[in-house]
């Protein structure tokens, strides 16, 4: 039961096993919501205060905002986005290729917290940082701030509309390019969507402020990326950065699949697709200095596109890879603010800036500015303590199991939830075995989820991977694995594992087929002029159930996204006054928690707060 529920969970980045707050607590659906926004928010605060879904507020953590440099009076400098607007995407990319400076993308707003904090950082924490970045580090090529798992997690766990986040970041940071991670036909989901969804998604994202789309396909199949690439090119304003997912070690003479030749052939197809920038997406942190030297040298020799290198510092040595990449002519690299860097995240921005300062490849970023932003992120990380995966330090085991950074932290959290934390190495070993069994596919969302699902399933069922491989028809197989074997994600680079594939599929009834056609009514919403209508439709099409739960949360508790992180996650502290500003309520609320009663025989507690001088009693179900 427990394990099956886990495997059905679509969101592999989630820390929690259940399908979400409301999913866990269906009785909330019966409670009548307060009839005004202020009342709904107070109900939310009372509920979090009583039930403490994330435990108590971490002690001795400063309010992040107090750690931000004072930027109010600084002018807004010209930044990378101004250059993109002036030049257009093609000339912008040419410029990038010609410049000496090593360009840098800041991933703190997306990949870093996806890889360290289960993607839980809220817009509330991102927005002030974006304002500071706009003024202090406008030389950044881009800020990766959207896409990947953020869309899903925003709705499912943070009860934020991901589109609102994009609007807010765009407003906070008008001068620096916003970059998103787009999973090709899978957009920001885990299964392929019809082309019309992908097109509408890209169009709406570009209109809303995404400047650079990093597009990849989980199996490195360029044809699967074409609808997304074409849609970006059609905007005429946004940059199409197309990525090759990196696996194996191309310097290894025994590597027969992921060879230099393999990547050059793929790059050729990417170039033919009309891409502006070529990216190497090293999602697991496997790319070694000698390999990147060969790869970047060859890519720059064969093609005219700028090359952007992305990695995760899982084993701890990726600054060396960046150094080698830069020497070989790489045009851009990715880093994260130091407190949210390292291990499963990107290498540290300040280390990158310092490494190239006063050299031909000087990033142009101010080391002082980059490090001035660090105390803010350190405080944010402290506040988000419950979402830490517990990845204690670098690990060289990644070279064997090849688990992507974002997934490695998530699998740890899942293992802990299953009571398998002390046997995490077994999960890693099974992952490696399943990888071999499935023909060493590239492993990145969602193909990584396929491998992870089967690995966890085998651990849970106590089945040896070799026994499973010998006789797959004898065993239960997770839906994602069946879908993969049916070819729903496309064809893996190394071909299909046979006879495993045929045997595994033998006699299996059809699972839930992916959406192949958009219902007529939704298509009308997608085509509508009204952006709100299109956004709502995209939310429903991409994540039907989380969207429902999100809307239910709004109905029940109002728009909680303006709440401070401290109150949103941990609720009120008895006796302490908290000022709460709500966008739709004119007067701020000064709230003090006065008392919480013991639960009555129906499990309800009375919560008494003082709100702007008035006593406010509330009833909350104790779910603990
Ligand atoms: C994602 O798809 O979310 C990823 O970060 C893949 O690396
Ligand atoms: Zn990544």
Image (spheres, helix red, strand yellow):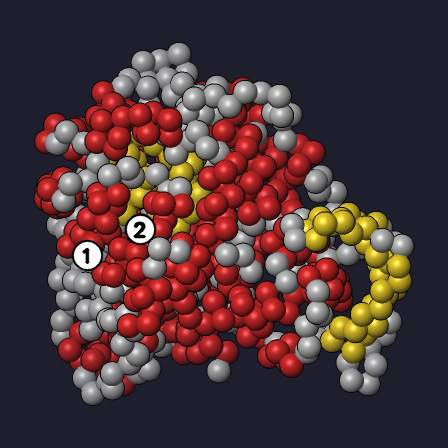
Q: Is residue 267 above or below residue 132?
A: below
Q: Nearer the viewer, residue 175 or 313?
A: 175
**Which residue is the site of mark 2?**
202
**Which residue is the site of mark 1?**
224
Measured in 3D between alpha carbons, the distance from the residue under mark 2 to the one under mark 1, in whole angstroms, is 15 Å
Q: Is residue 393 above or below residue 591?
A: above
Q: Is residue 411 above or below residue 27?
A: above
> What is the crowding at mark 2: few (fewer than 14 residues within 10 Å), some, or many (at least 20)?
many
The residue that appears at 61% across and 35% down in the rendered structure is 376
Q: Is residue 572 above or below residue 476?
A: above
* Left or right of residue 30: residue 135: left
List x then y, in percent, for residue 364.
40, 18
List x then y, in percent, for residue 498.
13, 71
Pair 2/1: label in front: 2
Q: Is residue 307 visible?
A: no
* Left or right of residue 459: residue 252: left
Q: In the rendered view of the protein, which quadrant contains the C terminus?
A: bottom right
Q: How many marks?
A: 2
Q: Label for residue 453?
A: none
Q: The residue tagged with tag 2: helix, strand or loop?
A: helix
Q: Nearer the viewer, residue 474 or 55?
A: 55
The residue that appears at 69% across and 77% down in the rendered structure is 32
> What is the crowding at mark 1: few (fewer than 14 residues within 10 Å), some, or many (at least 20)?
many
Q: Residue furthest front?
A: 529
The residue that appears at 49% across and 41% down in the rendered structure is 169
The residue that appears at 50% across and 51% down in the rendered structure is 164
Label 2 vs 1, first from the N-terminus: 2
List x then y, in percent, for residue 335.
42, 34
List x then y, in percent, for residue 590.
81, 50
Mark 1 sits near ligand 1, with its Cβ under 8 Å away: no
* Left or right of residue 148: residue 153: right
């Amino acid at each position: 039961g427990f394990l099956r529920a886990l495997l059905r969970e679509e969101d592999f980045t989630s820390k929690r096993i259940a399908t979400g707050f409301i999913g866990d607590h269906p009785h909330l659906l019966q409670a009548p919501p307060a009839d005004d926004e202020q009342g709904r928010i107070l109900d939310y605060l009372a509920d979090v205060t009583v039930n403490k879904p994330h435990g108590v507020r971490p002690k001795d953590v400063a309010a992040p905002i107090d750690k931000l440099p004072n930027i109010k009076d600084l002018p807004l400098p010209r930044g990378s986005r101004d250059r993109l607007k002036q030049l257009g995407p093609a000339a912008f990319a040419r410029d990038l290729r010609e410049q000496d400076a090593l360009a840098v993308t800041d991933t703190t707003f997306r990949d870093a917290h996806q890889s360290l904090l289960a993607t839980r950082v809220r817009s509330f924490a991102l927005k002030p940082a974006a304002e500071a970045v706009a003024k202090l580090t406008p030389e950044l090529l881009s800020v990766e701030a959207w896409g990947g798992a953020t869309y899903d997690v925003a709705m499912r766990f943070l009860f934020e509309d991901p589109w609102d986040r994009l609007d807010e970041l765009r407003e906070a940071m008008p001068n620096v390019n916003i970059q998103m991670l787009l999973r090709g036909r899978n957009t920001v989901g885990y299964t392929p969507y019809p082309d019309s969804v992908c097109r509408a998604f890209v169009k709406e994202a570009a209109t809303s402020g995404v400047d650079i789309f990093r597009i990849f396909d989980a199996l490195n199949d360029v044809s699967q990326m074409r609808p997304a690439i074409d849609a970006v090119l059609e905007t005429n304003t946004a940059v199409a950065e197309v990525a090759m997912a990196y696996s194996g070690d191309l310097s290894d003479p025994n590597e027969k699949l992921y060879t230099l030749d393999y990547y050059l052939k793929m790059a050729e197809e990417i170039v033919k697709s009309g891409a502006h920038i070529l990216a190497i997406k090293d999602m697991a942190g496997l790319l070694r200095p000698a390999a990147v030297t060969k790869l970047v040298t060859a890519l720059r020799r064969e093609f005219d596109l700028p090359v952007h290198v992305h990695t995760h510092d899982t084993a701890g040595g990726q600054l060396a890879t960046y150094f080698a990449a830069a020497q070989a002519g790489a045009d851009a690299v990715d880093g994260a603010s130091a407190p949210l860097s390292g291990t499963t995240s990107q290498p540290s921005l300040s280390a990158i800036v310092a490494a190239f300062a006063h050299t031909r490849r000087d990033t142009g970023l101010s080391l002082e500015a980059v490090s001035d932003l660090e105390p803010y992120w350190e405080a944010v990380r402290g506040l988000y303590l419950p979402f830490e995966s517990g990845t204690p330090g670098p690990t060289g085991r990644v070279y064997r199991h090849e688990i992507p950074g974002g997934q490695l932290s998530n699998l740890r959290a899942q293992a802990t939830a299953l009571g398998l934390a002390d046997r995490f190495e077994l999960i890693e070993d099974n992952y490696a075995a399943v990888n071999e069994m499935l023909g060493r596919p590239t492993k990145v969302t969602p193909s990584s989820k396929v491998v992870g699902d089967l690995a966890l399933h085998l651990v849970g069922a106590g089945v040896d991977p070799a026994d499973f491989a010998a006789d797959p028809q004898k065993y239960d197989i997770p839906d994602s694995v069946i879908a993969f074997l049916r070819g729903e994600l496309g064809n893996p680079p190394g071909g299909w594992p046979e006879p495993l594939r045929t045997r595994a599929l033998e006699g299996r009834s059809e699972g839930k087929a992916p959406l192949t056609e958009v219902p007529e009514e939704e298509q009308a919403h997608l085509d509508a002029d009204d952006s709100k209508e299109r956004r709502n439709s995209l939310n429903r099409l991409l994540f039907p159930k989380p969207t429902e739960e999100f809307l239910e949360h709004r109905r029940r508790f109002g728009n909680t996204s303006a709440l401070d992180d401290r109150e949103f996650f941990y609720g009120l502290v008895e006796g302490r006054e908290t000022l709460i500003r709500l966008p739709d309520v004119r007067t701020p609320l000064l709230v003090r928690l006065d008392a919480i009663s013991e639960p009555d025989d129906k499990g309800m507690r009375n919560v008494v707060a003082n709100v702007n001088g008035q006593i406010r009693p509330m009833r909350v179900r104790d779910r603990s």
